[in-house]
Image (cartoon, rainbow, N blue to C red):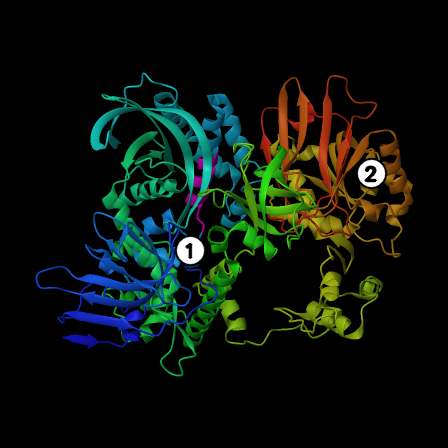
Amino acid sequence: ATQCVELNTFSRPGNWKEDGAVPAETLVYFQKKVADSPDVILKNGLNNRYRVLEVSVRQRNGSDPEKHLTITASPSLEDTELCILRNGWESVPVVPGDIVHLEGECSSGTWVISAQSGYLVLYPDLLLSGTTISSSIRCMRRAVLSERFRLGSPQMLIGTILHDIFQQAVTNDLTQEKVQELANKIVYGQKYLKEMYLLNLKQAQIMQEIEEYLPSFFKWAEDFMHNPANQNKMQLKLSNGGKTEDVSSKIEVVDILDIEENIWSPRFGLKGKIDVTARVKIHCQSGVQSRVMPLELKSGKESNSIEHRSQVILYTLMSLEQRVDPEAGFLLYLKTGTMYPVAGARMDRRELMKLRNHVAFYLTHSTYKSDVGRQNSQLAALPPVIDDSQTCKYCSQMHNCFLYSRAVEQKMASVAFPPALVPVIDRETQHLKPSHLEYFSLWYLMLTLELQSGEHKKGYKNIWMTPSLEREKAGDCVGNVIRVGEVHEVSEGQYLHCFQRRNGAIPGTNLLVGDRVVVSGEEKGLLGLATGYVREVSATKVSCLLGRNLSNFPKNTVFRLDHDEGDVGTGVPFKNLSKLMKDCPVSERLRNLIIDFQKPLFIQHLSSVLPPEAKETVANILKGLNKPQKQAMKQVLLSKDYTLIVGMPGTGKTTTICALVPAPEHAEKGGISNVTEAKIVLFLTSLFIKAGCKPSDIGIISPYRHQLKTITDLMAKWKESRVEVNTVDKYQGRDKSIIIVSFVRNSTDENLGSLLKDWRRLNVAITRAKHKLVMVGCVPSLCCYPPLEKLLCHLQSQAMISFFSMQPNQEAFNSLEVSFQQNNRHCLKKLMVTELKHPAYLWQTRNLKHSVPSTAGYCYILFCPDEQLPAEVTGEALEEEGSVNQCCSESVFWVQFVFKNLKM
């Protein structure tokens, strides 16, 4: 007896029976009309791709069920083959229309995937990370949500930094002292500043955590690196002469071949970065074996858990793309230095691939067409909620899990929830109105559809499914190139490579300067070696700035450069959507404005915002704007909440925004002030005090009283009243060890004012410092004042300062160091620069004539022209022994900081 079942009742995620159970009938049959899709590449062979046409589940008396798939690699959907799934593989939720890759042997047009042989990979061109798959072991729902909502945490950041330190330490075979220096350089460097800022972490906090791990690094190195005499034996299952033996072995790591080795494996639908790829000697009773094996680093609690072991097993599977089967890998816990062997057994790989297929199914079938009208897309159910309140309590995705459940799944009759969790879900989401839940549901759907659309366009699969010669014809690839010249490290983690065509000139290409590219090898397995950006394109060469140094590959390695359209950028919107639904005052206010359309508030009269004294300044800002643009600016000034500026292309929206943004100098009641510059002055003052200077030895001078009030108010918030803040006139006849001068002005308009034109006041301001003078201001603006222009010209003519031009888009500055030295006592300060994409200059000060002979001071300071978009700069200090008073000489530092986001 055969029963036909409407496919739609089985094809939606959440309705599929996970245990593979089928009705009592002999045959359950799934079929729907499958149309050809032009963006799907089907092929036979080793790198095959099949489309599933029909699915049937067969059960014979007394035997386990089997799933039979009718498949085809023909674009015309003809020439079908049969694939039989058994021994647990029948639980894979495959439906007609799905794309699969098959590993194993095909006999007479029939594939058999069983416990002993073969793999079925569902949607193989969707590459999933080992982390995602291993996290699905305890909760499939968490794994799927983690692909949408990528969250950061302090523990994750500390783990990333520890990985970085360990990898560099073992690669360069560093001593204990050098590793400590390396840790300081990385923690106090520029690389992780953005993540620290987002998580509100201090570098000192992170350094304190990092230092706990460093002794274990050396313990591991002493035990396993270049130490054939070590007595640490491990049980390893390895093949030897065709047999698999479980033997006690001594492990010796003889070479570090790669760190963060990026592997894309479309053969198994996997991707990942192997923390350390090492050449290992295995000393066992039968002899010595040498293998290339993955080493996975863990910074958390030593658990040797199934999730951690699973990641290593998946890395052994991925390694098949580039080398012989390592059969095993290692799991190293950085806090204790303990290392565990992990065997990549067939059974473990098989079960993990089944999990991978389930995750891929839910991600691919995250939407479906509704029964009504058949045109409206709907969100599908996620994997079921687990009935484990303890696991849920500490889950990083709990908020998003409960939110999706309440907004989407509770409307589905087919989705059931554990009874104990229903009141918990309601309680955790009770702060949300029905309109908020509807908003979440709508925009989750919109973002998912956008993501699906982008995945079709992005075409990563073309890198491994389409020859470079064919891609070149469309202008999306440059193939058959080799690396020429030396690789230059332009900045930390950024390497400049030059590629040249092996034979002839580079064909016509759509690649432009600034385009993102994926670099792969032409030979099998070398996929996604690095990503980066095009720096230069000529008739014979292409230069690229990559995130990985490819100089370790042989000189004759042939590469291809594929245009990477990148993802559609849904990561941040998904995260923002989640934050919008949080139970906190900020999110509640935003929900009221955005979702409930609460009317934005505006100030009634412009005179409440701008005093009469500012009339002339405002007139200069509005110069050149048309009437609608001026009206838009007025609305922005009056706004308490937000102002929407709407207009067709070319109507001047960008011009209006450009007039609104460069306003660090505000004309307010009582005079002129520059809040950003005031924050910089406070920041520099805090650094001097941290370095050992007495607050009473520091003086702050500004020619504008309102700027003094702004600085004083900031000082009060900082609870520092011992630093004297005063006008130039008040400092007449007095001095301080350190003087910081704030010039305030940040415009080049004709309304300059007279204070900065007074050379007598300038003379007083720059002669009040006994040891150190720091002048803060905008150089292009201050050059409009004759006395200051002469000062700058004099300093430059006497070689007291010099500047070096830097071309646009050059990313050469990771960190700029200010170093003072005396008698081997140091005080280091670092200014970290990110997103530097515009012309800038490097100013270097040298000693004045009357500096103390035994001291030396020099300074590198970023200057960004005011007319350019500002670089995002932040600062942090590292103080060692000594103080600025003791170790600095009489030098003039002309400082121009531009802070996009200054967090004090």
Instruction: Tell me the number on the disc at residue 125.
Output: 1
* Extreme residue toward the front, this view: 108
Sequence-wise, which precedes: disc 2 or disc 1? 1
Q: Where 842 sits versus 80, above or below? A: above
Mark toward the viewer: 2 or 1: 1
Label 1: few (<14), some (14–19) or many (≥20) C-alpha neighbours in 10 Å: many
Mark number for residue 561?
none
| Residue at the farthest left position | 62
Report whether residue 387 is seen. Answer: no
Residue 113 place in picture, x, y as percent: 24, 53
- Image quarter of residue 401: bottom left
Which amino acid type is marked by label 2? Ala
Is 804 in front, or is 497?
497
Q: Taking 582 as reference, is 647 above or below it?
A: below
Query: Magenta part of the protein: which range?
Result: 152-164
The reply to whether the magenta stretch includes residue 160 is yes
